Image: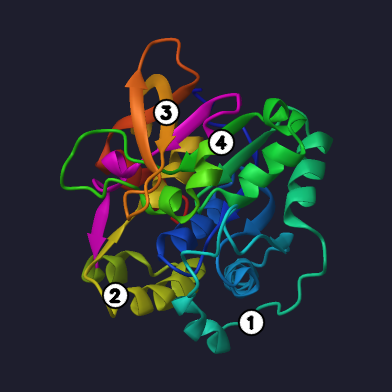
Amino acid sequence: MNQPSNDTIKVILDTDIGSDIDDAVALAYLLAQPRCDLLGITTVSGQPVERAKLASAICKTAGRDVPIIPGYEDRLNGPTRQPEVPQTSVLPNWDHDTEFGDQDAVEFMAETIRNNPHEVALLAVGPMTNVARLFTKHPDTASLLKSLHMMIGRFSDDSGLPTSEWNAHCDPAAADVIYKIAAPHHTSIGLDVTHQVVMDSSQVKEHFQHPLLKPVYEMSEVWFSARDELKFHDPLAAVALFDDSVCEYESGTAIVKRTSDRDDGETVWSPHAKGPHRVGKTVDAARFFDSYFGVFS
């Protein structure tokens, strides 16, 4: 799905911003990307209103009025596996909305997609709860998308990676739904490639000097209090939407394996040329970083 360099893409971002720092990094990119027409942001997983507040802080820093709709907290068949939103500790330092109306996130997504048939890229970078509810309640919306881009899964046998990627593990039933629907350009960016785009805390401090990245950098300090690296999971999915050449892809079929332990939500990959899904297999890390930071220069 190579995009011409001047092609504007309408995007809905579905995000669990506030847990891992990479969601905020991805949102800042979308707000700075001149080719992105960000139609709305829906939040998912534990404390979705608090997550919406963090998205609001970044949008306000960018001077953008983007609809933000808190979505579903619990997974499809159980309580959330991600109840905490540690980065809310920065909210007192940044202007942000505190109320977001009573619109349902799934209804917002359905209405927006139907109003823009075959024009919306749904970029889902959290647990797939909202997206699965969308496709279950409004099955016509999947075929009305321009593309479905997700950060989810692990599609190789690399023993150094978790068997079940976190977004898939946080709602395996929802992940199962999204791999059973047919959607245009059904694309997954998994841990296989996102673990290859990494910065340490000193590199992040050096590169996150743009005004739009200031709240993101402050959020990253919360993240780095417990770890040493930032892996650009969600930003890679976002950049790949606008620069298809940052990754090489493979077609095939993904299924979701259920267990009763931390492996719950494993994505099992079977490559074949005419498969309904495509997954990222390699990444050009240098090109990714050039594409990501290029929108801020």
> How far is disc 2 from disc 3 in space, using C-alphas?
33 Å
Q: Amino acid at mark 1?
A: Asp
Determine the residue positioned at 41% across, 66% down.
Answer: 21
Crowding near pointer 4: few (<14 within 10 Å), some, many (20+)?
A: many
Residue at the bottom extreme, as displayed: 92
Instruction: Give the mark, 2 or 4, whose residue is nearer the N terminus.
Output: 4
Instruction: Give the mark, 3 or 1, whose residue is nearer the N terminus.
Output: 1
Instruction: Give the mark, 4 or 1, whose residue is nearer the N terminus.
Output: 1
State the residue position of label 1: 95
State the residue position of label 2: 224
Secondary element at tag 1: loop
Q: Amino acid at mark 3?
A: Ala
- Quarter residue 181 falls in: top right
State the residue position of label 3: 254
Q: Nearer the viewer, residue 257 or 236?
A: 257
Crowding near pointer 2: few (<14 within 10 Å), some, many (20+)?
A: some
> How far is disc 2 from disc 4 in space, using C-alphas?
32 Å
Indicate which label's residue lies in the foreground, 3 or 1: 3
Callout 2–callout 3 Cβ contact below 8 Å: no
